[in-house]
Image: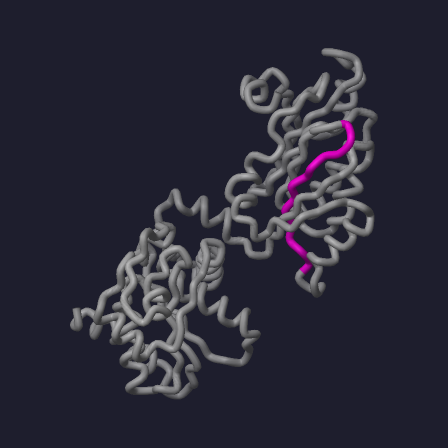
Amino acid sequence: DEYVIAGQGTIACEILKKCVSQPVDAIFVCCGGGGMLAGISAYIKQVRPNVKVYGVEAADAAGMTASLAAGHVVTLPSVGLFADGAAVKTVGSETFRLCHKYVDGMITVDTDQICNAIKLAYNDARVVLEPAGALGIAGMKKHVEENNISGSTFVAITSGANMDFNRLRVVSERADDSERSLEITIPETPGAFRAMYSKIWPRNVTELTYRFNTEQEANVFVSFQPLIHVENDFEQVMEEFIKDDFLCTDLSDNELAKTHIRHLAGGRSNAHHERLFRFDFPESPGALMRFLESLDMKWNISLFHYRNYGDDFGRVLVGIQQNHGPKCEGMNRFLQDLGYKYIEETNNPAYEKFLR
């Protein structure tokens, strides 16, 4: 509808009125059916044609991007629904015509980039945007990073806060773009687990999963935040592992690993005489390292799982193989002297069903 497009174009009028005495280099507009993008671009190019206008779409619902590339309106076979406020299979014919004439380019962003944009908006303005409403910020951030831009004035349109509370769980999990993930193969020898962790320390570890598999080697899934003041810090960590014959694979951009494998890593094991314990410790910088150092014992660790949920207490699940059958008073004394609150879960039916 032309009147709807014109009404949405008044957003551009408001932007320019607020920026009369200052430059505007580009405006980033979320795009679903294309009405807002068409209206804003049409107005901007009549009043200040030097200002660039970019449309931003979710990568799995990029109808306008596909249509502009094809030169005609394209109907997508399916669309992703994470950014459901902008999930449109077929853009409007009039919006396409205007966007084809006035828009300077299209940018597509994935789910992680959208979640990070929601986090940025909350940190900056204490506003919780819905995924579609954060597309403009996500596109602007991607454009700046890919083109190494500094010193420019950009405007991102935020256009919705219809956030479902249950979706916040996904946003929180995927929003941290500082987190990097590795799969590391370590020898199944005493001290190898702590040696592996020492190569990551003092970086903040957000997730650590290990499960005994064979007598020769073990696979560890670990996520951590590289040091921001060290250039190429993540790559340096990988080089350290490889130099010491630890095989490792970067899983940071692996969608299967981020969505599923991180929750399934480990699984069942035939570790003999295994006992399972849940530990709690006050969460603070270095707390996980201190906990690992305290587990300096003669028994083999056959399971380890830690995930930082931002709580005030860290929660760790640890499997320990004792040497002498179902009872081991030496281990009991060690656990009591450890100084950490713990609960034994060896007889928990969930453990028996899914980890044994």
Q: Position of residue 143 (x, y in %)?
A: 49, 70
Q: Give the vertical position of 51 relative to 249 (above or below).
A: below
* Residue 122 in view: no
Q: Position of residue 66 (x, y in %)?
A: 36, 64
Residue at left 42%, top 82%?
24
The quadrant in which residue 330 appears is: top right
Q: Position of residue 62 (x, y in %)?
A: 37, 61
* Residue 264 in view: yes
Is residue 255 left or right of 346 when viewed as pictured?
left
Residue at left 73%, top 28%?
214
Of residues 49 and 116, the one nearer the viewer is 49
Majority secondary structure of the magenta segment? Answer: strand
Of residues 66 and 220, the one nearer the viewer is 66
* Count of numbered circles on the image: 0
Residue at left 56%, top 49%?
254
Q: Give the vertical position of 308 relative to 341 (above or below).
A: below
The quadrant in which residue 258 appears is: top right
Position of the N terminus, as image quadrant, is bottom left
Q: Give the vertical position of 105 relative to 174 (above or below).
A: below
Q: Which residues are magenta?
A: 215-227
Q: Position of residue 60 (x, y in %)?
A: 39, 55
Of residues 221 and 126, the one nearer the viewer is 221
Q: Is residue 222 magenta?
A: yes
